[in-house]
Image: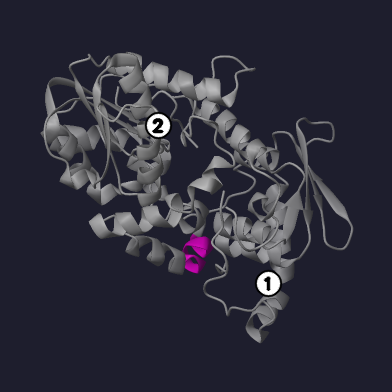
Amino acid sequence: MLASPGARADNLLPASDDSPLVQWLDARLGAVARRRVLDGLAAWRVGRLTVHLPEGTSAVLGAADAEPHASVRIVRDRFFRRMLLHGDIGVGDAYIDGDWHTDDLALVVDLALRNQQAAPLESMATTLWNVADTWRHRRRRNTAHGSRTNIHAHYDLGNEFFALFLDPTLAYSSAVFLAPGDTLEAAQLEKFRQWGERLQPRATDHVLEIGSGWGGMALHLARTYGCRVTSITVSEEQRALAAARVAAAGLQDRVAIELRDYRHIEGRYDRVVSIEMIEAVGQEFWPGFFQAIDRVLAPGGRVGIQAITIPDQRFDQYVRRSDWIQKHIFPGGLLPCLREVCAVTARHTRLAVTDVEDRPLDYATTLRHWRGRLPPGPARGGGRGGGAGLIPPGGGHP
């Protein structure tokens, strides 16, 4: 993951944590924030977390012999203030700034999710203190111009950077793991294979892909089924490399990579596929997105969409505020939920949801592979400044 260089965690406070206002606030809130956070964490029930405090003492959350066990070290007391006032944004920014660290971040996050009742990250206080981030997120609307800006901020970081942790397919989406020992490349190829089986394009078909990535899906469909593929993207970096990969494969006669927004697609397509692109559309533009697909889909055509989804019961609360991922990783991003996808397609299109598969554990495994492949350095965390049917196979709840 990446963090925007120089981004402020406490957006309602002065830029320097040495400022008199911040020092006054920490002096007044420090003890209260620590007590509130630790009292809440005392309700830990799944696994065990050892918290090493700045003065050298420690607290054990959960049963003494509970497994799995993770450990965190709080370096500065301001962590408690940031967690209390800013929730997940505060915890994430405090990690980047070195206010706390751990030897196993993935396990800490996993245990925190399993103990959400002990570590609530949303409250009236976090809504108030994160209002600037929420306002900034609302301004990053995915209009035609806004989409290019938002995509450029993430996907145009440089193809060389993404190649550091992606496998040779360059697929930047959840893979499908059939067995524990599957390699990342094998699991990504399995994802392509399963989508091909679902879509079943014929050699005479013309397939539209919305969101090219680096061309992996388009290449697979053209090679395997002999169909024509038009793949569109608004990322200049992705378009350049995807087109080069098509040329290297000698498939220019069957695969076209175009720099085009989904709003401007034309023609008629027998199949439409979109792999983890809908997260960059935005709720207000979902009707137009699905209407664009409906407009160009040939009679009897099929649509396959892979998405990172959020549970239906969390969606209404989720859309009311910005979170750490929207602030630092995917500007303008918004995860859909199945309920809303079904409602939008029913209300605005002739499309019908015919098949749904949820594979959240596959996404967790994919993320572990990516993190393991990323070289050591600032991007691994611990210091400010860089680094980073209709619903799938391979999607899932984060």
Pick whichever, 178 or 85, lies toward us.
Answer: 178
63 in relation to 124, above or below:
above
Mark 1 or mark 2: which comes first in sequence? 1
**Residue 387 appears left or right of 195:** right
Q: Which residues are magenta?
A: 124-130
Number of labels in the image equals 2
Going by the numbered disc 2, the residue's amino acid type is Ala
Q: Residue furthest bottom?
A: 20
Badges 1 and 2: C-beta atoms under 8 Å apart?
no
Residue 353, picture quadrant: top left
Q: What secondary structure is the magenta-colored segment mainly?
A: helix
Q: Whole-percent x and y of residue 266?
A: 12, 39
> Could you tell me the amino acid type at mark 1?
Leu
Q: Is residue 321 visible?
A: no
Residue 87 vertical position relative to residue 178 in the rendered view, above or below: below
Residue at image location 54% in from the left, 15% down from the top: 178
Write the residue at 27% across / 17% down: 226
Residue positioned 60% across, 40% down in the render: 113
* Mark 1 crowdedness (10 Å alpha carbons): few <14, some 14-19, many ≥20: some
Residue 299 position by quadrant: top left
**Label placed on residue 248:** 2
Q: Nearer the viewer, residue 147 or 389?
A: 147
Instruction: Indicate the position of residue 31 as horizontal and vertical percent values.
Output: 74, 68
Q: Which mark is residue 223?
A: none
Mark 2 lies on a secondary structure that is helix
Left/right of residue 68 with respect to residue 94 in the rendered view? right
Can you tell which of label 1 and label 2 is closer to the viewer? 2
**Is residue 169 at least partly visible in the picture?**
yes
Q: Position of residue 272 (x, y in %)?
A: 24, 28
Label 1 – label 2 distance at C-alpha: 60 Å
Q: Answer with left or right where residue 19 lies relative to residue 173.
A: right
Return the mark for residue 29: 1
